[in-house]
């Protein structure tokens, strides 16, 4: 009888071990431990939380209002070219002003500016085939070219040291060139106000301008 009892006891222990292993494997398969709770690092079937919650940032070549690179065919509130920076505008719509800092460079083509284009001490300013709703005021600094531009206000070159060129523009205000030391060329413009040139070191060319107002100073002819 002792042998039978020992055999039965071994079978009971064996069955208990099998059941315990089955319970343990079932909990692992469902992401649960021995307590029936989700194990660490596992997700429940209804858990939709993503691990990457960082926001997506849309980066461009410019920060708001500042340009040190290229802005293409898009609308912006204003453009500020920082000191020493180079800004290229191609087909850009500017609701406000374009301002260029000292030693800055502005290259603008096919742009529309509702406000002014202003530069003081800029190294280079070139505006071509564009429309400016206000004035173009270029003071001190280096060279400047204004070509095939419709300007609702005035065009001013003042105390600039590089070559200056104004050609085939429609200026609804005045065109003034005062105190410049670089070569000055003003040709083929339609000026609905006055054409005034005073105290310029060199007036290379001034001709074929249609002036509705008066002609004064060094640009008094042509």
Image: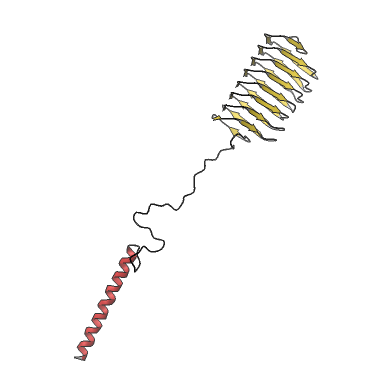
Q: Residue furthest bottom?
A: 2
Image coordinates for residue 88, horizontal then vertical, percent: 62, 31
Q: Quadrant of the N terminus?
A: bottom left
Position of residue 17 in the picture relative to residue 75 (left or right)? left
Up/down of 188 relative to 53, above or below: above
Up/down of 79 relative to 204, above or below: below
Q: Nearer the viewer, residue 87 or 35?
A: 35
Image coordinates for residue 15, horizontal then vertical, percent: 25, 77
Q: How many marks?
A: 0
Residue at the spot x=61%, y=31% of the render? 79
Residue at the spot x=76%, y=15% of the render? 197
Displayed quadrant of residue 66: top right
Image coordinates for residue 36, horizontal then vertical, percent: 33, 65
Position of residue 144 in the picture relative to residue 181 (left or right)? left
What scheme was used to colour the molecule?
secondary structure
Displayed quadrant of residue 23: bottom left
Up/down of 109 relative to 2, above or below: above
Position of residue 199 in the picture relative to residue 26 (left or right)? right
Q: Nearer the viewer, residue 163 or 50?
A: 50
Displayed quadrant of residue 97: top right
Position of residue 185 in the picture relative to residue 11 (left or right)? right
Up/down of 23 relative to 158, above or below: below
Image coordinates for residue 22, horizontal then vertical, percent: 29, 70
Residue at the spot x=29%, y=73% of the render? 20
Residue at the spot x=74%, y=18% of the render? 177
């Amino acid at each position: 009888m002792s042998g039978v009892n020992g055999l039965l006891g071994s079978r009971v222990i064996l069955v208990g071990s099998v059941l315990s292993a089955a319970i343990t494997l079932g909990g692992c398969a469902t992401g649960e431990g021995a307590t029936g709770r989700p194990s660490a690092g596992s997700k429940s079937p209804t858990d939709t939380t993503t691990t990457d919650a960082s926001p997506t940032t849309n980066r461009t070549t410019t920060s708001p209002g500042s340009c040190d690179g290229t802005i293409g065919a898009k609308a912006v509130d204003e453009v500020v070219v920082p000191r020493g920076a180079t800004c290229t505008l191609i087909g850009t719509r500017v609701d406000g002003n374009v301002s260029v800092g000292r030693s800055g460079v502005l290259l603008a083509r096919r742009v529309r500016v509702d406000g002014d284009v202003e530069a003081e001490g800029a190294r280079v300013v070139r505006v071509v085939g564009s429309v400016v709703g206000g004035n173009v005021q270029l003071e001190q600094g280096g060279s400047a070219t204004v070509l095939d531009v419709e300007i609702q206000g005035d065009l001013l070159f003042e105390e600039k040291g590089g070559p200056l060129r104004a050609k085939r523009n429609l200026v609804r205000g005045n065109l003034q060139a005062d105190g410049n030391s670089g070569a000055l060329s003003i040709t083929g413009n339609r000026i609905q106000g006055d054409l005034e040139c005073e105290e310029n070191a060199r007036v290379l060319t001034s001709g074929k301008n249609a002036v509705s107002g008066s002609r004064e100073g060094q640009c008094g002819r042509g």
